[in-house]
Amino acid sequence: MKFFEDIAIGERIALGRHTFTADDIKAFARRFDPQPFHLDEAAAARSPFRALCASGWHTAATWMRLMVEHQRAADAAMRSRGEPVAMLGPSPGFRDLKWLKPVYVGDTVDYATEVVEKRVSNSRPAWGLISIRNTGVNQAGEAVISFVSVAFVERRGGIAKEAS
C-alpha cells in the first residue's frame, strides 16, 4: 500500500474481472442469500429478473476478493523493489451502495476503484482516511454496482511517531 501522502485523488485502479457462472451464483446464494431467483432457474424465470442472477452481495464480495488480491500483489511488487509498504487500516464503512443492473449467468464484470476523497484523521493523526468509489461494469459497458468505501491508510512516519 502506498502511504497516505502518495495517494492522489483521481487515482484509478483496474482490479480485475470475474465471470459469474450458474454454479457460483447458486453456491453463494445457498450460503448467504437464499432467495429463489438466485437458486433456481424456473423460479428466477417467474421473478422480475426473468433469469437466474447473482446476489448483489455476491457482486460486492467479488469486488472485495479482487481488491485484496490486487493489494497483496501491489505490496509484494513494492517490497521486491525495496520500497516501504504502508499499513492499510480498517474500514469504518461504506456509503451509496447501488446495485444498478442484475448480473446474470455468463456476465463478466470488470471491477475498478478510484480515489475520490482523502483527509487526515482527526482522532488518529498517524493515519489518513481515503474514500474510494468502487464500480463494476458488465461486458456491455453497463454499470452493475457502485459504492464508496472508506479506509484508514498509514501516513508517512505516522505509526513510528505515534509509538514514540
Image (spheres, rainbow, N blue to C red):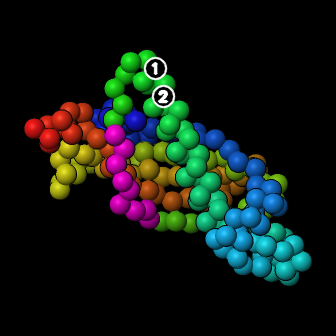
Residue 10 image position (x, y, % from top left): 43, 40
Q: CA distance from mark 2 to mark 1?
A: 6 Å
Res 139 label: none
Query: Type of residue at label 2?
Result: Ala
At a point 34% along the width and 48% down the height, the residue shown is 89
Residue depicted at x 43% and y 62%? 94
* 72 sits left or right of 144 in the view: left
Indicate the quadrant where residue 32 lies: bottom right
Question: Residue reaching furthest right?
Answer: 42
- Residues at discs 2 and 1 in contact (Cβ within 8 Å): yes
Across and down, in percent, residue 122 comes to: 18, 54
Residue at 35%, 60% in the rendered image: 92
Taking the view exactly as shown, the residue that stands out farthest to the top is: 81
**Which residues lie in the magenta part?**
87-95
Q: Which corner quadrant holds the C terminus?
A: top left
Above or below, 13 against 131 in this view is: above
The numbered mark at residue 80 is 1
Above or below: residue 11 compared with residue 95: above
Residue density around tag 1, few if under 14, some if 14–19, many if 20 or more, within 10 Å: few
Instruction: Please identify the quarter of the rendering in which residue 146 is found.
Output: bottom right
Q: Which residue is mark 2?
A: 76
* Label 2: few (<14), some (14–19) or many (≥20) C-alpha neighbours in 10 Å: some
Q: Nearer the viewer, residue 145 or 25?
A: 25
